[in-house]
Image (tube, rainbow, N blue to C red):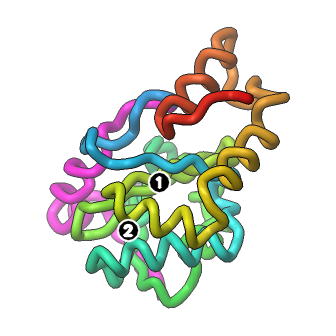
Amino acid sequence: MALWIKQDEFDRKWGEAYRSVFSRAVLPDRPFKNSSWAVVLLVGGLRLNDVEAGAVAELATSLGDVEYVAVDAERKFPRNQLAVIGEWTADPIRTHFGSWLGHTTVHLFGRSSTWGLVASNEDLSILGAPRGHTEVFVSRVGGEEYLRAKFLEEFAENPYVFGGPDSESRFDRLLQLAAWVRD
């Protein structure tokens, strides 16, 4: 079950953890404060497949987070519906896709402040966590070459999904976050 919380409760209970995970940088700049974290690029935004969504839950619980927080990172919606707290018993990403969170960029994180997920409404997600944990995540979902090829197949032919006149540059900067290059 998920619980919606208001701004003041979020700030009081989760604000410090949130600020320690996310840099508030706009994509394609690095969205995580911890520069030592490995970054994994995923196709899907709020539409991650079951394996990837399950692997995010496994990563989070392996780091001690039995619940997640999903936040409207763009702050587009009313302050009284800023964030959702839920348990990993269900897929949090798809659970909230049909809500207003499906129309914005969402930040997922946990109290441990040791991982974060940016789920963009541009159909991509960026996972950040300590390298050993991202390596387990990557192997669980098919391997780094599989994820890289999937990402390139989805976006290389149409980097304009990232908008603006500098979309090619933005796309290449996203690839750099994960230390990937085009073929």
Label 2 or label 1, whichever lies nearer to me, is 1
Q: Can you tell which quarter of the image residue 32 is in?
A: top left
Q: Mark 2 sits on what residue?
A: 69
Q: Is residue 36 visible?
A: yes
Amino acid type, residue under disc 2 in the picture: Val
- Give the residue drawn at x 57%, y 72%: 140
Give the magenta part as a residue range. 1-27
SS state under label 1? strand
- Residue 129 % position (x, y): 35, 57
- Give the residue drawn at x 50%, y 70%: 56
- Give the residue drawn at x 69%, y 47%: 123
Amino acid type, residue under disc 1 in the picture: Leu
Name the side, left or right, on which 81 lies relative to 7.
right
Quadrant containing the C terminus is: top right
- Residue 66 % position (x, y): 34, 84
Q: Can you tell which quarter of the image residue 169 is in?
A: top right
